[in-house]
Amino acid sequence: MPVSRFMSSDAIRSTFSAAMSAMYRDEVPAYGTLMELVADINAATLEQQPGLRASLEATETLDRISEERHGAIRLGTEAELAMMRRVFAVMGMFPVGYYDLSEAGVPVHSTAFRPVGEAALKINPFRVFTSLLRLDLITDPKLREAAREILGRRRIFSEGAVMLVEKAERDGGLSPEDGERFVAEVLGTFRWHEQASVDHALYERLHAAHRLIADVVSFKGPHINHLTPRTLDIDAVQDQMPRRGIVPKAVVEGPPSRACPILLRQTSFKAIEERVLFPDASGALAGGSHTARFGEIEQRGVALTPKGRGLYDRLLNEARAKVRPAADGSNAQDYVTALQESFTAFPDNWSAIRKAGLGYFLYSILPGADLSGHAGTGIESLIEAGLVRFDPIVYEDFLPVSAAGIFQSNLGDEAVQDFAASPNQKLFETALGATVLNEFEHYAGIERASSEQCLAAARTLSAAA
Ligand code: OOG
Ligand code: NI
């Protein structure tokens, strides 16, 4: 087989996420501390749970367990979003899911660029949650036009990056040399700029409209606002953050701790205050600050069907109606209790979750199973006969409610505002220049293909017998 002269998109993505991690640890030292804590807890968890170690060893690369799983950026214009899609495509990352954060009072809508196939996810699952600012949600027309004008003028991609994207599209890939250059050029887009592109008065006006609007409009580029490694024990990391001198947000977002993890649990340390220099009309620089960047951790469970997701949303809302977690953590324990109580209504064993149609599962034939004589049967009888096993399909996407919780806790509690919710997926996709993959259909397709494979094997073996 001829060896490809291209650097694989998976390799470009891995190089990129490693470079981003190094840059961010350098820019936000507290993030480096969080990474150390995560690595320590992961090591301790593996030591305490040999069973977990064995199962992870069978399915993943243990030495990379503590690496980043996702990051997030916020873009200002449709053109930026369209170009970002082409940049991520070079790294094998494609838009999955649509998230309308205006429903949670945050003036953006989003997608996640991520690897889609099982093989690519395994090599490196790095995703970037990418938001587009909704300028139409700025009510003051003068401010809206000022923001539009400022964003329209900025260029967030280097000429080198654009050239290499075009080259990759033209040639179908990049050479290893170009791949390395591409990563270096693209990394610059995500860098922090200490010097703002607006004066202090305008920053304040943008900030008063919404802190996130100031975060997007006031800077030269879409600085990475957090990175998120995977932890094997999110509660332990949450507990121990203060001991390492970092301040965690009040509660872990998402479902409670369970025997059978579902969806996604996340928490973060609170965004740090960073020094910013604001130029005035004469070009002189005035000192100020901006709070946007943080570090987060995640722990993933099974992907839920629309039915499972409906139940999840209902139970979460029930718990939050009982106890609304305060930003200062004063009622954190009450919230955890309410959450746990409410989720007793969600079955906590894989078989029950599957039978109730709440989660997506991957079916496979057990080693040594004899499927002959099972031609006409369905997947259920193959499972009952002990011939086919099922394993949870991991949720690879995000949770708008959880995302909103993360946004809010890092914007200060007072930042909760009312924006009219208007699902604008079509507009988003027009800006993007592509449709987003529907995550539910995607998981359902993986599940269907796996069960069809088992049934086809039963048919073939029965015909041969
Ligand atoms: C993105 C928040 C979404 C998550 O983990 O849910 C996210 C942002 O703050 O820009 O990353
Ligand atoms: Ni995140």
Image: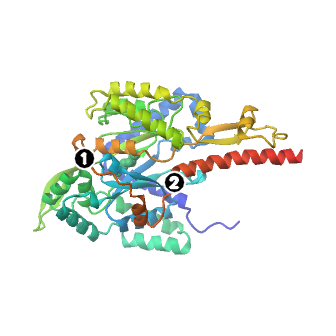
Compared to residue 52, the image places residue 286 above or below, namely below
Q: Which quadrant holds the N terminus?
A: bottom right
Q: Is residue 126 left or right of residue 195?
A: right
**Foreground residue, 335 or 164?**
335
Residue 438 circle label: 2
Q: Is residue 363 visible?
A: yes
Q: Is tag 1's residue or tag 2's residue first in the polypeptide sequence?
A: 1
Q: Residue at x 43, y 44 (%)?
A: 399
Name which residue type carries label 2: Asn
Q: Is residue 130 visible?
A: no
Compared to residue 412, the image places residue 421 above or below, namely below
Q: Residue at x 72, y 37 (%)?
A: 388
Compared to residue 335, the image places residue 17 above or below, namely below
**Foreground residue, 433 or 17?**
433
Give the secondary structure at mark 2: loop
* Residue 106 on image: x %, y %: 30, 50
Residue 453 circle label: none
The answer for how far apart the CA atoms under marks 1 and 2 are is 28 Å
Q: Dot 1 corresponds to which residue?
A: 417
